[in-house]
Image (cartoon, helix red, strand yellow):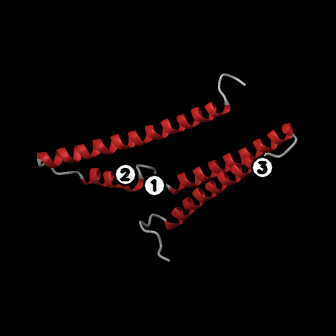
Amino acid sequence: MGPFSDSAGAAAFWMFIAIVALGGIVKSALQHHETQKTIRQSIAAGKPIEPALLESAMLDRVTGGGDRNPGSLMLGGLIVIAVGLGLAIMGYFIGLDDGEPVYPLYGVAILVSLIGVAIGGFGVWAYRLGGKQEAPKG
């Protein structure tokens, strides 16, 4: 065992994940704040507000500033499925070393793969909507 115990290594990993997630949240909040500040200054100065600026602010609010391309969801789904398959293969090779299969890792691989299937499925669904703004009822 090295300078870190197993629990310290796990804590360091989750701290890294938390820092990355908080960084994304802060970046998004600052971008929205700047857009809203520009709109407020335009209103206070009596200048007309460009429709493109308002539309951009509203789309960022609805989509989270993300890409609205269904192909991106399909590609993301395929990547996540590939990660799940890689985890299953990794579990198999770890099992060869220990002499027993690593069932928890297989479970994680299945979970990750199913998340990829869901993401890709939403991409296909969005592609079939073909630019319609509302989801079909029923």
* Residue located farthest toward the top when viewing the structure as drawn: 3
Label 1 neighbour load within 10 Å: few <14, some 14-19, many 20+: some
On screen, residue 13 versus residue 30, left or right, reads: right
Label 3 neighbour load within 10 Å: few <14, some 14-19, many 20+: few
Residue 62 to residue 45: above or below: below
On screen, residue 95 versus residue 25, left or right, reads: right
Q: Earlier in the sequence, mark 1 or mark 3?
A: 1
How many marks are shown on the rendered structure? 3
Q: Earlier in the sequence, mark 1 or mark 2?
A: 2
On screen, residue 81 versus residue 48, left or right, reads: right
Residue 71, given in percent of the width and then of the height, sits at: 54, 54
Give the residue displayed 47% in from the left and 73% down from the top: 136
Q: Earlier in the sequence, mark 3 or mark 2?
A: 2
Label 2 neighbour load within 10 Å: few <14, some 14-19, many 20+: some
Residue 59, given in percent of the width and then of the height, sits at: 36, 54
In this figure, which residue is indicated by the disc labeled 1? 68
Q: Which of 44/101 is in front?
A: 101
Q: Which of 40/132 is in front?
A: 40
In this figure, which residue is indicated by the disc labeled 2? 60
Q: Secondary structure at mark 1?
A: loop
Residue 45, given in percent of the width and then of the height, sits at: 12, 45
Tell me the kind of residue under disc 2: Asp
Measured Cα–Cα span from mark 3 to mark 2 = 41 Å
Give the residue displayed 70% in from the left and 54% down from the top: 110
